[in-house]
Image (cartoon, grey):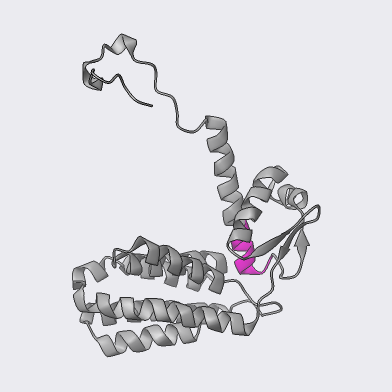
Amino acid sequence: MYEAAHTPVSEQPQAHRAPAKPLVPAQKMLRHSVRGQVLDALRAALVDGDLVPGEIYSGPALGERFGVSATPVREAMQQLALEGAVECLPNRGFRVLSRTPRALAELAEVRALIEVPVMLRLARTVPAATWEALRPAARATAEAAAAGDLPRYADADRAFHREVLRLAGNGQLVRTAEELHRRAQWPLPGAPRARRADLVADAAEHAALLEALIARDLPVVESLVREHFAGA
């Protein structure tokens, strides 16, 4: 919406200004908030194995489970379909997609191709003080791992990698890497739940990587990052 062509906003009489209107109606904002909460809950259920690959889930049934209407569930599920986690089945619901070990290996390979060279470049240029500021992000992964909280660990793990990659100043890179990372966190059909010891070991790699980045020890950085993806 444009103001009068020849009268600056600051010079217009206050009494003649129309009251500001919210960009998004309150009811729509509330709906988006509910959808976001449901989306977070569904993502956590995927990581935790509560939503089983191959199974079909209906919007109303999931809505009853989360204490909401079917509408925000369907909207959240449509987002998960865009992310490749589920497929929409007209008049039936949503099927959680199954993947293979080969698919996970391919994701790990692509992530390594993206992140390893970026981290090596950052290791050469980013000052130690900046890496020190990432210690809370690494600590968050360790705390979630120690608690054996898999969904919380998945969020903290992505957050740590996101904070590292943000230092490259490339938003497209960060978004692409995070999407691949999220897909890599969905378990395989019938796979056992990740053990607490495995999460603790994975979190320890974050702390070790920070130490190598602070020391600008490029061979160790490369080794740690490649091992991290190999075990993903």
In the rendered view, would you say 65 is above or below 23? below
Instruction: Give the left or right position of residue 185, taking residue 175 as reference.
Output: right
At a point 23% along the width and 18% down the height, the residue shown is 6
**Quadrant occupied by the N terminus:** top left
At a point 27% along the width and 21% down the height, the residue shown is 5
Residue 196 in picture, x, y percent from top left: 55, 77
Magenta range is 42-50
Instruction: Give the left or right position of residue 4, taking residue 182 as reference.
Output: left
Residue 167 in which image quadrant: bottom left
At a point 59% along the width and 46% down the height, the residue shown is 35
- Pick the front one: 31 or 66: 31
Residue 152 in picture, x, y percent from top left: 52, 64
Residue 137 in which image quadrant: bottom left
Res 85 visible: yes
Q: Is residue 190 magenta?
A: no
Q: Is residue 45 magenta?
A: yes
Residue 48 in picture, x, y percent from top left: 62, 68
- Pick the front one: 187 or 17: 17
Magenta stretch prevailing secondary structure: helix
